[in-house]
Amino acid sequence: LPICFPVTICFLLVAGSARFFPANQDGFTFMILIGIGTYLPYVAVHTAVFERFLAITRERANIGFLMYLADTAGYIGYIALMFAKDTLKSKQNFLMFYNNSAVYISVLSIAMLAFSSIMIYRRFSIRNNA
């Protein structure tokens, strides 16, 4: 999928911004980079990747339910982040906890995007060879 490269760049923007924030950025720049790095993949995945999933199945449908599931996962992730902040009582402050979470989630997102790209590619190549 051609969308994978820009989405990966956005996730790397989030991870890099979160990892190197304390030394190199002010708060405003940090929030802008995190916002761009999370919103652009959100839109790209909702439009391109989910549409490809539906195209593979050749079912007449729209991406509404998949969007609902993705949004729900995002809300649950936010609740989990807030719950963990209050219950784990880690030795690091919340900003470091948030930055570490952003890095881990970005790496996980890149891995999931790579997995879905491979599955879409295989499914399309099987269908085109048959």
Image: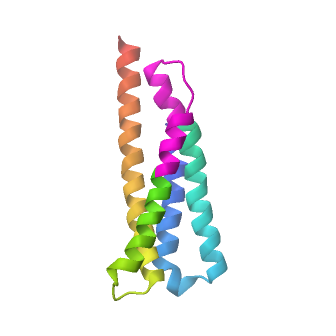
- The residue at 41%/31% (across/down) is 120
Say whether residue 127 is magenta.
no
Q: In which quarter of the image is residue 124?
A: top left
Q: Can residue 2 be seen in this view?
A: no
Vertical placement of residue 85 versus 93, above or below: above
Measured as percent of width and height from the top left, residue 72 is found at 49, 50
> Up-down: is 68 above or below 34?
above
User: 63 or 32, which is in the foreground?
Assistant: 63
Q: Which residue is drawn at 48% across and 81% down?
A: 95
Residue located at (35% from left, 10% from top)? 130
Picture residue at 43% right of the left edge, 81% below the top: 96
Coordinates of residue 28 in the picture (x, y in percent):
66, 78
Q: Is the magenta stretch mostly helix, strand or loop?
A: helix
* 60 and 53: which is toward the camera: 60
Residue 17 position within the rendered picture, expressed as x and y whole percent measured from the top left: 52, 72
Task: Specify the segment rendered in magenta.
Answer: 49-72
Coloring scheme used? rainbow
Was residue 50 drawn as part of the magenta stretch in this picture?
yes
Q: Can residue 44 be seen in this view?
A: yes
In the rendered structure, the answer to whether residue 32 lies left or right of residue 2 reads: right
Q: Position of residue 119 (x, y in %)?
A: 36, 33
Q: How many labels does the image show?
A: 0
* Residue 51 position (above or below residue 103): above
Asked if residue 130 lies left or right of residue 57, the reply is left
Asked if 87 appears above or below 58 in the picture, the reply is below
